[in-house]
Amino acid sequence: MSELIVILNVLIILGMLIAAVMAVHFEKLLSSIIALGVTGIFAAAEFLLLRAPDVAISEAAVGAALSPLIFIVALKKIRGGDDK
């Protein structure tokens, strides 16, 4: 059982690293914001795996939902809805 948890832990960390690199690599800001949200989802999954459900719920609400939403709204207001 612990072997499965270690494998799942490595996969989640790897997914988080890939999403973070993609957030930096993308040229379009909207794509970077979405990749940042995916990083937050992986972080919430990692907290669940580490048996910290309260922190996982907070990370899912703030890191995966609220922060990307605020960034998207700010991007739309700055560019007038045009994503270049």
Image (cartoon, grey):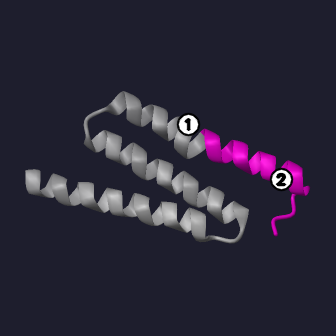
**Mark 1 packing: few (<14 Cα in 10 Å), some, or many (20+)?**
some
Counting every numbered tag in the picture gives: 2
> Of helix, strand and loop, which mostly describes the magenta segment?
helix
Q: Amino acid at mark 1?
A: Val
Task: Give the residue number, with chain letter if any, for mark 1.
Answer: 62
Indicate the secondary structure of the residue bearing disc 1.
helix
Question: Does 74 appear in magenta?
Answer: yes
**Mark 2 packing: few (<14 Cα in 10 Å), some, or many (20+)?**
some
Q: Where residue 57 appears, x then y in whole percent?
A: 44, 33
Residue range of the region highlighted in magenta in the rendering: 66-84
Question: Does 81 appear in magenta?
Answer: yes
Q: Looking at the figure, which quarter contains the C terminus? A: bottom right
From the viewer's side, name the closer residue of 27 and 55: 27
Whether residue 79 appears in this view of the structure is yes
* Residue at the limit of the structure toward the right, as seen here: 80
Badge 1 or badge 2: first in the primary sequence: 1
Task: Give the residue number, with chain letter if any, for mark 2.
Answer: 76
